[in-house]
Image: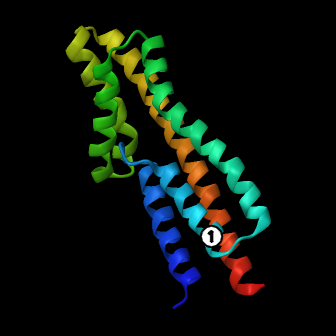
């Protein structure tokens, strides 16, 4: 087994964990996938992939920052509290065990319970939970698309290396 083979396997592992990280709160999906892309670039230095990797780095940076900023911003815009954001993240984590419905209902219910514990207002809690759910959904979609793009780039680089 050669060094590029080992690097490609490590990259595949990092990309898999990165994809998982799009759904698991606290696991940095796109940055892990990007490290996998860097390993692919080291294993088989393709000029096109290296140029794309620089652009993907900026995308990963933007997605990671937005993933931290958007939930708080949307929850704040709805007049919510930090407990709603925490509730949404905990609901997402618990929802992993009850996929696929749990992934959709978990953040909503968690945000609702977090806001209701703080404000004790049903209408406010429903509004905040909808905004928080929307922010979790938007962040997850951005992370998922980014990780899939990185996975495709790594796969393309591996095919280029082994076939050409």
Q: Nearer the viewer, residue 155 or 104?
A: 155
Residue name at image x 42 percent, y 25 percent? 132
Image quarter for residue 49? bottom right
Residue name at image x 70 percent, y 51 percent? 54
- In this picture, residue 73 sits left or right of residue 123: right
Point out the residue furthest to the bottom here.
Answer: 1
Q: Nearer the viewer, residue 150 or 74?
A: 150
Identify the element where label 1 is drawn. Answer: helix
Against 124, residue 135 (above or below) is below
- Location of the C terminus by quadrant is bottom right
Report x, y in % for residue 112: 30, 23
Report x, y in % for residue 163: 74, 86
Q: How many marks?
A: 1
Report x, y in % for residue 32: 48, 55
Against 162, residue 66 (above or below) is above
Q: Which residue is mark 1?
A: 42
- In this picture, residue 100 sits left or right of residue 54: left
């Amino acid at each position: 087994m050669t060094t590029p083979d080992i690097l490609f396997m490590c990259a595949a592992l990092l990309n898999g964990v990165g994809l998982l990280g799009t759904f698991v709160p606290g696991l940095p999906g796109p940055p892990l996938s990007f490290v996998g892309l860097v390993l692919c670039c080291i294993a088989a230095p393709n000029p096109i992939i290296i140029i794309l990797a620089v652009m993907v780095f900026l995308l990963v940076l933007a997605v990671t920052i937005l993933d931290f900023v958007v939930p708080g911003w949307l929850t704040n815009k709805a007049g919510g509290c930090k407990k709603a954001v925490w509730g949404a993240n905990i609901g997402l984590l618990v929802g992993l065990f009850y996929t696929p419905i749990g992934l959709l209902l978990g953040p909503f219910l968690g945000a609702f319970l977090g806001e209701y514990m703080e404000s004790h207002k049903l209408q406010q809690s429903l509004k905040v939970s909808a905004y928080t759910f929307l922010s979790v959904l938007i962040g997850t979609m951005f992370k998922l698309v980014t990780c899939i793009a990185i996975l495709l780039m790594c796969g393309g680089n591996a095919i280029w290396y082994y076939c050409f």
